[in-house]
Image (spheres, grey):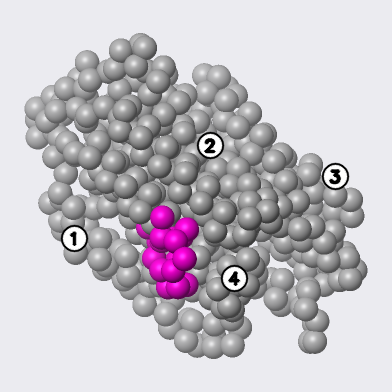
Amino acid sequence: MTGQPVGGVPVKAFPVARSEARLLVPALMFIALVVAAVASLGAPLITSVATSFHVSLGSAQWTLTVALLSGAVATPVLGRLGAGPHRRATILVTLAVVVAGSALTVLPLPFAWLLVGRAAQGVGLGLTALMMGVARDHLPEARSAATIALISVVSIIGVGVGYPLAGLLAQLGGVRAAYGFGLLVTAVAFLTAWRSMPEAPEGRSAHVDVAGAVVLAAALLLVLFLAGERNLWSRHLAVAAGLAVVAVVLLCVWAVIELRSTTPLVDVRAVRHPAVAGANLAMFVGGIGMYLLLTLITRYAQTPHGAGYGFGLTTFVAGLVLIPFSVLGFVAGKLTPRVRTRIADPLLLAGSAVVVGGGFALFAAARSDLAELFVAMGVLGFGVGGFSAAMPGVILAVTPKSETSSAMSFNYVVRSVGYSLGSAIGGLILAAGTGPGHLFPDDSAYTTAALVGIGAMAITTLTSLALARRRSSETNP
């Protein structure tokens, strides 16, 4: 079996034996699930961290933001390293960093060390694209496509797994107990990778574009900082707008660096391919909408009855609302590989975006009963699962096998930025709907946010349909 040529020389791939493949697939799934779940531990523990470390909620919020930031920065770097001959070593070293970071979150150290540990845990988010690269190199084509789709889904539903579990452990044993669970599962993930990860195919090379990595890291730092600092937009709009302009300039500089580099961090020319560019645009706008609804439902569920709406759920019980999201997301992920034999991936993206839009419509129209929130969350999970499972097929259809990790890592950076903006937009809309002297927003603010989400998913649907029309014209000239 041969992979894509590198420098005109065919690359040898090493498909694993059938018995090894049976072990490899669950190992890939488990590692993707663990890094996603551990990175999401910051969300349900923000209040507990603020109380335990005697810091403000804004400071405690950084336990989530710093993990997302380090993950966004590490993802393209790991994607490039994963495209080279040292992919196994890259995976093991990255997981070792995650384990070390997990240990820092458990040890009785000051708050600053907790942030360092969370940043190290976030680096693991970059492994998802590498798991896809391993699957594409070492599994038969049909099996690898289904596995890559499930890895993409698992990286999403890990949030739904980590949120309620972290809430329960924090409720029973405190914040250290919740982070202790993260240390346990990351250690198991490291041992799993040590035993199961095969070497990369021969003949590949990968050099990290250091200048590009530094500029991209600075740009992403500004983007995610602006997405997380909602007060900056409301109180210092000129400063926020100025920083946004700087971020855009840095991204443009990064694109120029990548175009001129012989070993770019991300192959910008490949990213400009209409199918890849369209898929990333759909991922960006769709990510805004998907995370917006996730944020709205969980926040609505925890709002106390005194606000005139909401259910006053504890962190753990509110986390249980995410169970339909995870279960139906996994179901959609399992169904998608079968459906895509009859329906093109771009059409699956469009259909999934419509489903997510339906979740927004349900939330906007009916949220007076807790069961209605479960239904809306289930619809969201099914749409996100289908969308995530179909996305790799759109990108990898025009991507060389040797560039799998790099191409998907860029898509995951786009997704991370979209998710962060979705959370920020939700916060800004709800803040705008909060009257003077009131702690909670008006109920109508949630309806406004839901309508914005419907608009985002409409754009995502139209973008996906344009991709489908282009693919149809290329296959049927």
Distance from the alpha carbon under mark 2 to that under mark 1: 31 Å
Residue interval drawn in magenta: 103-120
Magenta span includes 118: yes
Which residue does the numbered mark 1 point to in the structure image?
Answer: 210
Q: Circles 3 and 4: CB distance less than 8 Å?
A: no
Q: Residue at x 12, y 51 (%)?
A: 262
Q: Which mark is residue 52?
A: 4
Q: Circles 1 and 3: CB distance less than 8 Å?
A: no
Mark with earlier residue (4, 2):
4
Element on which disc 4 rests: helix
Which residue does the numbered mark 3 point to in the structure image?
Answer: 371
Label 2 crowd (10 A; few <14 / some 14-19 / many >=20): many
Q: Quadrant of residue 198?
A: top left
Q: Which mark is residue 153?
A: 2
Q: Position of residue 426 (x, y in %)?
A: 65, 65
Q: Residue at x 72, y 71 (%)?
A: 430
Distance from the alpha carbon under mark 4 to that under mark 1: 38 Å
Q: Quadrant of the N terminus?
A: top left
Q: Residue furthest top?
A: 18
Element on which disc 2 rests: helix
Q: Is residue 244 above or below residue 122?
A: below
The amino acid at mark 3 is: Ala
Q: Residue at x 22, y 57 (%)?
A: 258
Label 4 crowd (10 A; few <14 / some 14-19 / many >=20): few
Label 1 crowd (10 A; few <14 / some 14-19 / many >=20): few
Mark with earlier residue (3, 4):
4
The amino acid at mark 4 is: Ser
The amino acid at mark 2 is: Val
